[in-house]
Amino acid sequence: MEFDDLYQEIILDHYRHPRHAGDVPEEELLVEEENPTCGDQIRLTAMVKDGTVMDIKYEARGCAISMASASMMSEDLIGKPIDAVRGRIRTFVKLMRGEGESMPDEPGDLIALEGVKQFPMRIKCATMCWHAADQALDKLTGGTGPCAMSG
Amino acid sequence: MDPLQAVRTDEPGPALDSRRIRWDFPILGRLVHQDKPLAYLDNAATTQKPKAVMDALETYYASYNSNVHRALHALGEQATLAYEEARARCAGLIGAAAPEEVIFTRGTTESINLVAHSWGRRHIGEGDEIILTEMEHHSNLVPWQLLASERGARLRFVPVREDGTLDMEGYRSMLSPRVKLVAFTHVSNILGTVNPAREIIAAAQREGAVTLIDAAQSVPHRPVDVQALGCDFLACSGHKMAGPTGIGLLYGRRTLLEEMPPFLSGGEMIKKVTLETATWADLPHKFEAGTPHIAGAIGLGEAVRYLQGIGMEAVQAHESEITQYALERLQQVPGLRILGSAPDRGGVISFTVDDMHPHDIAQYVDSHGVAIRAGHGCAQPLLRAFGHTAVSRASFYIYTLREEIDQLYEALIKAKEFFSHGI
């Protein structure tokens, strides 16, 4: 695997123009995640209504992969029913860890992140925001999602 | 403060021909990512190994592999001789009074843990103080945290100033009879700062404190003499000085080592064993339980021979010259900031570049054949003090060429272009 497989143009585009990024005030904050190895950070909030994820907002600091992943994730998950969202988180995280084979259905831009799984050092960069979203849903629904179940 | 002004350039020293030296390191000729020449600038993490070291390992396994000590046969005698000769070489490198003051360990981390367990548990008690610095590698921090919490002792930290030097006034004001140990890094693995070891030790000794030097980044790069420094303990790693991984040293002052209990116990380290009790072997074997890393020690001995052949003054002079060049070159990269500007510094430069994450930088320059490190460098508290969680780090050795610094420079310029404008 080479550099260009990792940093595709779509990833750079999301990195430079992150979708759904914005300030997350303390009162809205649901999850704060940090990767102490590299200092990547994400503060995330979400809104659920009638079983559907209506909005995700995050404040992130990190490398191009982690920022792009958060941007793509929010675009991918917003507007989908919670069950579907949980399924997509499970599929994506499994794919990154090498435990699954395919992207979530109709992956859209997410497809550009597939190359990350070939770079073991960077997998956490791509998955941190997905874990954060999963935990945010736990808080909003009182249940436990795929990330908690698989450790 | 301008880091360029800060570097010492008045070191003459005999010249070292890094271009010739490179022939001794087969790995330096390889290409990465299909067709990129390798610029290996991650030497503070581990250095490459010369052919002589690899040959020494192979020769041991191929022609006299045997366990050391007590073997009454030809191979055993040869192995024991080579193992002990390696110890004597290492003792010579660091100026130890006798080979028995040098104990083979797995590396700096184990050496420090050995002192924390064997010396620390006996001598550190409730209310005692241990002085460290804010620039310690985790390996010279965490063992003392564990010891302090176990014994009810207190850790104190010499502050690091903005220029990357230690606040020596602050240090002196911390000293008191409560201080039982002062443990500090000789050369910072992040800032490159060379700490005034002699001064630190002399002040500690006036209060009767024992001193330990984490020399992982100094012994490989400059002349170090434990007797001239006056330290009680010194720890370093073989793999950072052209030797194999899994082998390192602990130097200890004989009087201290003699009264210390063993660290690990079992074979090799005993004198007499009954079912109920055992007595300890003499130095250094008391601290070398089990079959040691014989090949590693022999390989390290060969690495020391190799370095001594070049001369540690020459090693230091070359690194000083290449570091000076790298500082100049890197400062030409827009938005690049170097951590620390100590007047006396080793061949380590940590930096950040505006709007680029260290991971992205490292990955990008790697695609151009340049190996640098990105992350916290096992010194999270220090980086936090400088307002970072991660940095990029380039570090040099005897074979580092100016062209490799240029290769890094070019790659950084391209990286800026890439992450701001795209492909």
Image (cartoon, coloured by chain):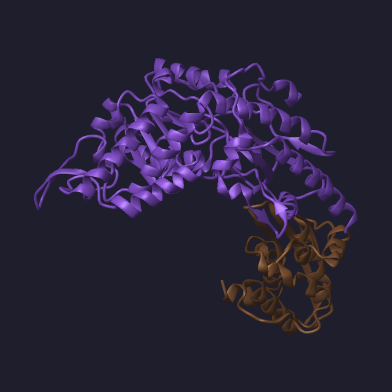
Chain colours: A brown, B purple
Residue B79 appears in which quarter of the rendering? top left
| Residue A33 versus residue B344 in the image, above or below | below
Q: Quadrant of the C terminus of chain B?
A: bottom right
Q: Is residue B294 visible?
A: yes
Is residue B52 or residue B365 the one in the foreground? B52
- Farthest right residue in view: B421
The residue that appears at 71% across and 35% down in the rendered structure is B402
Please give the count of numbered marks on the rendered protein: 0
Relative side of B97 to B145, left or right: left
The residue that appears at 37% across and 49% down in the rendered structure is B59
The residue that appears at 29% across and 37% down in the rendered structure is B84
Q: In which quarter of the image is the N terminus of chain B?
A: top right
| Residue B248 versus residue A109 in the image, above or below | above
Q: Position of residue B273 (x, y in %)?
A: 11, 47
Is residue A96 or residue B305 the one in the foreground? B305
| Residue A137 versus residue B64 in the image, above or below | below
Relative side of B92 to A104, left or right: left
| Residue A4 versus residue B415 in the image, above or below | below
Q: Is residue B293 visible?
A: no
Q: Position of residue B319 (x, y in %)?
A: 62, 30
Relative side of A23 to B313, left or right: right
Is residue B35 or residue A117 the one in the foreground? B35
Q: Position of residue B302 (x, y in %)?
A: 41, 39
The residue that appears at 78% across and 43% down in the rendered structure is B353
